[in-house]
Image: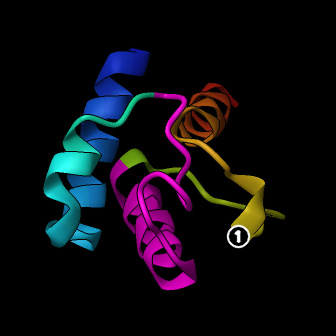
Amino acid sequence: MTRTEIKDRLVEIMLVAMPDAEETIKTATEESNLHTDLGFNSVGILYIVIAIEEFFNVRFENVGFNDFQTVGDVIDYIERAQAA
């Protein structure tokens, strides 16, 4: 799966978690900050983590709320987890 495909699916997941932020999420870049730019709180991040684990068949281990600052950080983690 390419970075673009991962990002596209991640955007879909984020839209389910925060439907009120559709315009902001759809224009997110890899540099977009999950907390300050997109407005995710710990509950939103938890939802995203669960959905990512299900869709991408990866497990988040030894990571916390602040381990992912940007959309790119999440994509990097998914890429590494899928390669393992």
Within 10 Å of disc 1 (Cα), the crowding (few <14, some 14-19, many 20+) is few
Tell me the kind of residue under disc 1. Phe
Quadrant of the rendered image containing residue 6: top left
Residue under the image location 41 percent in, 56 percent down? 38
Give, as a single range, the part of the protein colored magenta.
30-55
Which sits in the foreground, 73 or 81?
Answer: 73
Q: 29 and 64: which one is in front?
A: 29
Q: Residue at x 49, y 28 (%)?
A: 30
- Observer-nearest residue: 54 or 63? 63
* Residue 43 placement (x, y as % from top left): 49, 84
Residue 35 seen in render: yes
- Label 1 sits on a secondary structure element that is helix
Which percent across, then down, holds residue 39? 44, 66
In the picture shown, does residue 30 fall above or below 15?
A: above
Considering the image in quadrants, where does the C terminus appear?
A: top right
Q: Which residue is mark 1?
A: 65
- Side of 83 relative to 26 (left or right): right
Residue 63 shown in magenta: no
Q: Is residue 12 above or below residue 65?
A: above
- The percent coordinates of residue 73 (x first, y second) are 64, 38
